[in-house]
Image: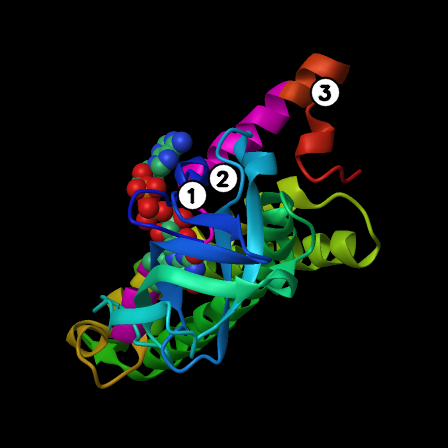
Amino acid sequence: MTEKASGADAAGLQTRAEHRDGGWVLNGEKWFITGANGAAFAIVVAVTDPAAPPQQGMTLFMVETDNPGWQMIREVPVMGTHSPGGHCEIRLENCRVAEDAVLGKIGEGFALAQVRLGPARLAHAMRWIGMAQRALDLAAVRANTRETFGAPLAERQAVQWMLADSAIDLYACRLMVLHAAWLIETGQRYRQEVSMVKVEVAEALGRIVDRAIQIHGALGYSTDTPLERFYRDARAARIYDGPSEVHRMVIARNVLKAAQQSGSTKSATGGLA
Ligand SMILES: Cc1cc2nc3c(=O)[nH]c(=O)nc-3n(C[C@H](O)[C@H](O)[C@H](O)COP(=O)(O)OP(=O)(O)OC[C@H]3O[C@@H](n4cnc5c(N)ncnc54)[C@H](O)[C@@H]3O)c2cc1C
């Protein structure tokens, strides 16, 4: 989906798909397409009706990567882990696909992309919880074993509070993910909750890894533990699949709407008793 000129705001998407001779011709550029190098196919979001509002003017296309119009320009060098297939810059140049390359219906691309993003954001949160748990485990082991000034770090209140804050963060993250997953599983509305999960877990991950590095001192800054890698990877979590600020914008919009409609914001805060 993402292009250099269109990230958080997908309305700026410029990749075009034109209907020609019983097929579609795609032109445009994408970047930060995770896993693209080595992938057999990609799902491309393109504008099919520039006059329509974005919610109705975009369509999804299945593009096989051996298509001569699909060019992998480079794997963009990044701060964090270079995951398999990288985060790639792609050029689509007169990329011709058949009629049946359309996924879903014409004009449904934006809506379908949002459907995918709901559960996908939750899956990210689950991965991040795993990373945060490992960081806290390492921090607790280090606190129990490292002695300074004649006593283990574990006996210092300043260190205990870091561990406690991370435990509280993790517990809240797990409960939020479980609740949002339950909403999806039971066919209820989940977008507000998934946005709140996305912000909370991405930011808690950063806090938990940061505290773990602090407890490890120079060892945490070294590459002898996985913590410095977690730290770099955690930084991206606040950006991809919607930056924290954009989720907060949507969350606040729903809070204000709920208050306007019923005088209560409860339905926009998870709807729990
Ligand atoms: C590691 C990684 C993997 C990715 N993988 C993929 C992928 O597989 N496929 C894909 O399509 N994309 C992918 N992306 C792209 C990602 O979804 C975009 O980076 C993201 O949507 C933000 O777009 P942008 O980078 O263009 O930032 P911009 O849109 O330029 O926004 C920059 C910053 O401005 C602020 N901002 C923007 N809008 C608002 C607002 N309304 N209010 C307040 N602040 C605002 C935010 O702080 C934001 O971080 C990936 C990105 C990363 C870092």
Assign a secondary structure to mark 2: helix
User: Compared to 236, does 233 lie above or below?
Assistant: below
The residue labelled by disc 2 is 247
Q: Secondary structure at mark 1?
A: helix
- At a point 56% along the width and 38% down the height, the residue shown is 57
Q: CA distance from mark 3 to mark 1?
A: 24 Å
Labels 1 & 2 near each other (Cβ < 8 A): yes
Residue range of the region highlighted in magenta in the rendering: 228-256
Badge 3 crowding class, 10 Å Cα cut-off, few under 14, some 14 to 19, many 20 or more, is some
Residue drawn 62% across and 25% down? 255
Observer-nearest residue: 32 or 41?
Answer: 41
Residue type at numbered disc 3: Ser
Q: Is residue 150 left or right of residue 18?
A: left
Verify whether residue 90 appears in magenta.
no
Could you tell which of marks 3 and 1 lies nearer the N-terminus? 1
Residue 140 in sight: yes
Q: Nearest the camera: 3 or 132?
A: 3
Q: Nearer the viewer, mark 3 or mark 1?
A: 1
The disc at residue 244 is 1
